Amino acid sequence: MNKQLQRGLAALGLSLASWASLAAPVTVNFSVTIDSAGSPLVGQSFTGSLSFDDALGSVMGDETLFDLSAFSFDFAGGSYALGDLFAASAVYKNGQFVGLDAQGDGFSFMPAWGGAEAYFGYDFGPDGMGNGSFAAQIDPGNGVPEPTGLALAGLGLFGLAAARRRTR
């Protein structure tokens, strides 16, 4: 009976430890700099951030698309959120973040497809249009997820079982 209990606790501890590391939210901070001549916003930079769960990607060949779970972008006097986008995905190619594929009312983000750089474009009709460069930085705080309380409890039970066995 002791061996079965020990094996069961070991299996529980390992499964809980691996379960805790499956999903990791990723936050990306980005900036857009308008660089098209003739744009009323030329030379101006705008910032934003996006988040997604890296365990929920859709693989398409060498690309992986992640639906956004959060989005914020301050642009041209307006603030935009996830609900303001028609479609939005963080795009990875061969394991590297290559940009954002998203469309809003009058603006769009395009990832680096086929050797082209990631960029941002907008068209507000008579208020102007233009495009610019897109630069992103993945938040380093999203490296390795911290163990959850449940995983730590499982490891504690495993340690208790091992200590109990030693005392016998």
Image: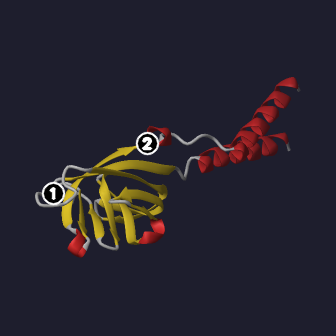
Picture residue at 32% right of the left edge, 47% below the top: 136
The type of residue carrying mark 1 is: Ala
Residue 99 vertical placement versus 149 (above, below): below
Picture residue at 75% right of the left edge, 47% below the top: 8
Picture residue at 63% right of the left edge, 41% below the top: 147
Q: Mark 2: few, some, or many residues within 10 Å (few <14, many ≥20)?
A: few
Query: Helix, strand or loop at disc 2?
Result: loop
Q: Earlier in the sequence, mark 2 or mark 1?
A: 1
Q: Where is residue 34, by image quadrant?
A: bottom left
Q: Position of residue 146 (x, y in %)?
A: 60, 40
Disc 2 target residue: 139
Residue 132 in view of the camera: yes
Q: Where is residue 130, by image quadrant?
A: bottom left
Query: Helix, strand or loop at disc 1?
Result: loop
Q: Position of residue 13 (x, y in %)?
A: 70, 43
Disc 1 target residue: 116
Instruction: Give the position of the C terminus as an image quadrant.
Output: top right
State the residue lying farthest toward the top: 167
Q: Position of residue 149 (x, y in %)?
A: 72, 43
